[in-house]
Amino acid sequence: MAVKIDKKITAYKLVTDEDKAQAAEAKENTKIVQLGEPLDRPEKITGSTYKVKTPVTEHALYITINDVVMNEGTPQEHRRPFEIFINSKNMDHFQWIVALTRVMSAVFRKGGDVTFLVEELKSVFEPSGGYYKRGGKFVPSLVAEIGEVVEKHLQEIGMLKKPGLDEHQQKLVDEKKAEYLEKHANSGEEMNDEGFPKGASLCKKCNTKASIIMDGCLTCLNCGESKCG
């Protein structure tokens, strides 16, 4: 199509192949790059279901996390979460649980690093206070317990490293626990289901009621945390 030029031409420049290549490269560099490609749902999917019974719900929660296998048949084969469902006979929390699982499933399918969800969920505190699980571990909220289940699952499939003491630390904790139990065996002191004294205080590191005064120092019989270093 012809274009009429009304103004006087004062200068001009021919566009070379090099100019076109530079313009194309600049356009390529300005493209939005996604951190991870959205995952497609395969025909067959596998997962795990975890039962959670808490004192704040009348009925147990059944948390199902389904995984998708990435790079199947290659040395880089691994599993990653794809979707999450939570079922229960208790309908009190139905609305927010459905909303939470849908958002989490969307994050899983988006790809990329999803391990940040664990800390986000575990940092949620119930305004009226949390509760203690069997064995004396404190949980700040029902949402935090869901986060612990997600953490456990990610550890099982290798996306998170399992926490724990090394051989020497575990040996020291076992020795401290055996020493304490030997001293108090004849005193009739009661123990909880996890084998810790019922009068133990809450350990701020592992959130377990297992901290006792030993040798004048507050020491956790579960994780070995000590105020004396």
Image: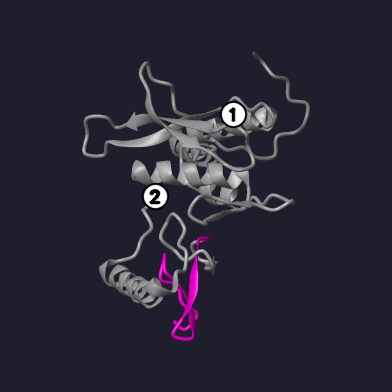
Q: Element at badge 2?
A: loop
Residue at x-position 49% and y-position 74% = 212
Report the span colored magenta. 207-229
Instruction: Please tell me which residue lies in front, 43 or 58.
Output: 58
Extreme-top residue of the structure: 1
Query: Camera-side residue: 108 or 200?
Result: 200
Residue 151 position within the rendered picture, expressed as x and y whole percent measured from the top left: 46, 46
**Extreme residue toward the right, this view:** 6
Mark 1: amino acid:
Arg
- Numbered circle sitting on residue 102: 1
Question: 10 Å neighbourhood of mark 1: few (<14), some, or many (≥20)?
Answer: some
* Horizontal arrangement in the rendering, residue 169 relative to residue 30 (left or right): left
Q: Residue at x 44, y 69 (%)?
A: 188
Task: Kindly report the distance in space between the C-alpha atoms of the residues bearing marks 2 and 1.
Answer: 22 Å
Q: What element carries label 1?
A: helix
Where does the image place residue 198, in percent across and percent down from the top left?
51, 63
Callout 2 amino acid: Leu
Report if residue 79 lies within the magenta region. no
Provide the residue designation for mark 2: 160
Camera-nearest residue between 108 and 92: 92
Q: In this view, does 126 lie above or below 31?
A: below
In the picture, the disc for residue 205 is none
| x then y, percent, for residue 131 | 62, 51
From the image, which quarter does the N terminus lie in? top right
**224 on left or right of 120:** left
> On the image, which quarter does residue 173 sit in?
bottom left
x, y (%) of residue 34? 50, 38
The colour scheme is one colour
Residue 219 inside the magenta-drawn segment: yes
Residue nearer the viewer, 121 or 9: 121
